[in-house]
Amino acid sequence: MKPIRLIVSLFLLTCLACDQAPSRNGMEIRVACKACIGKEISISHRSVLLQKEIKLYKARFDPSGSMLVKLPNQDTLGLALRVSEGDSTHFYTYVYLQPNTNIEVHFEKNNVRFSGDLAVVNNYLTDLRKIDTRRTDYKNVWSTANDRIKSEDSLEIYLTIIKSFGADFDKKVSADASLSGYEKDFLRSLNTNFETCRRLDYGNFKLLADRQVYYDNEDDVQIIKYQDSVTHAYFSGLKINPHLLKYNGSFYNWHLQIATRLSELMEVYYRQHKDYNLSYDYLKTTVRSNAGLAPHHDLVLGNLIALGYAGDGVAYDRLYEMVSGFKKDYPRSKYLPELEQILAEYAPLKPGAPMKDFSMQDENGKTFRLSDYKGKLIYVDLWATWCGPCVEEFPYSRKLAERYRKNQDLVFLYVSKDNNPKSWKSYLKKNLALKGVHAIQSPIEVDYNHPKIDSNDVMHLYKINSIPRYILIGKDGRIINYNADRPSELVNTKYLDSLLRI
């Protein structure tokens, strides 16, 4: 055959092979389980900033006992695969996938086996989860005996034992020629994750202890020096492992405890400026001053907004300012969609939005609703008898009630979140001077395995995580502020007077 014909023939054969080769655009998971026929299969992952489970797939096993799940091309993910029937989980495992790869998951007699592109890595991960179970058991025993690790020496003794559980795993991974260099680094990083999290726990404990040392010192010069160190190097001790962030970003992100660091920063800032409202530019400057975090500046800033501000009931316009600033600086960030989702969730609570109505019971067990007082200015006080800061506000509440006792256009509505109605009624009998409308809305019991949302719960409706909390509703039935000033802040102002004139 002449050379030119040979080249053409090879080209045609190559093209034919290309046409016949299966194309893969995304991730594929094939699940084989004969015992799962008719049961439900779901695949999910947890968002990094929202700390919520996001369902990617949900279906019911067909009679073949085999399911093929195709997911769109995306970043490396650690996925949770669950086979269940009603509230009962029959099989559960984590699956590690990279874009354009496939994996086969075989469930057999309470065991899981993997085959496919990333089978070796996933089998190692299964072994590692068993090791981490042993580490958790040891951690629980240690915690019971020692309460808390209080020194670096005791921390190192504890971690030496923790690390010993994974020593053989590390040797096996390092010697496995079938693993790539990246996969070895990834598995070794996960093996040290338990140790990393314990060090972060200790760092958080030390941070809180150091805060108390500075707070006990009323020397303004000392406070200013501390503030300077926070501003310029506050996140310098924070190191982020990209392997851990990719595999289980939600769990790892939680252990980074960035929100706790933000709380510390806000407290120190308040002591110097008498203001908790840190601007986006201030936070950005603080984070960016730490060059070692450069690849993850958007993660840290996203945390400060999602965990710090949204979780603490920031006003909608402040949250909008934060997210807008982030979007301008990091328009392609993988965390931007999560921040925009948070902003969208809080939009129904912005000033001028219709109030979120809910029902409650009075002292006689009679049910009534927030909307029953539409046409009046409503000041909602969420409290409980066991809440010290709530009760500390009541002397100021009495002053406000006395000031407006003749005004029929203002209602002080006290909504108790006590679990025990008897404790609530007993408290009210002893404090008859607390004038206003009193009601109770006991929280539902929390089942962490099967969490339920009470659509009537004021805490859920107004995205409230802690009490005391105060809500202002205008006479037109629209929200004025879902995180209003406390009585101690209102008592020396004429803010309520200005609202009553509207």
Image: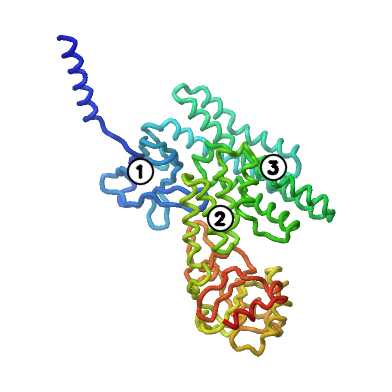
Front-most of residues 98 and 502: 502
Q: Is residue 461 above or below residue 139?
A: below
Considering the numbered disc 1 on the image, is that residue within a helix, a strand or a loop?
Answer: loop
Disc 3 marks a residue whose amino acid type is Ala
Q: Which residue is mark 3?
A: 233
Q: Earlier in the sequence, mark 3 or mark 2?
A: 3
Mark 3 → mark 2, Cα distance in angstroms: 21 Å
Circle 2 crowding by C-alpha within 10 Å: few under 14, some 14–19, many from 20:
many
Residue at coordinates 48% horizontally, 45% vertically from top-left?
Answer: 333
Q: Which residue is mark 2?
A: 322
Q: Earlier in the sequence, mark 1 or mark 2?
A: 1
Q: Position of residue 191 (x, y in %)?
A: 56, 34
Considering the numbered disc 2 on the image, is that residue within a helix, a strand or a loop?
Answer: helix
Disc 2 marks a residue whose amino acid type is Met
Q: Position of residue 374 (x, y in %)?
A: 51, 82
Residue at coordinates 44% horizontally, 44% vertically from top-left?
Answer: 79
Image-based side of 492 in relation to 39, left or right? right
Q: What coloring was used for the rendering?
A: rainbow
Q: Which residue is mark 1?
A: 72
Disc 1 marks a residue whose amino acid type is Pro
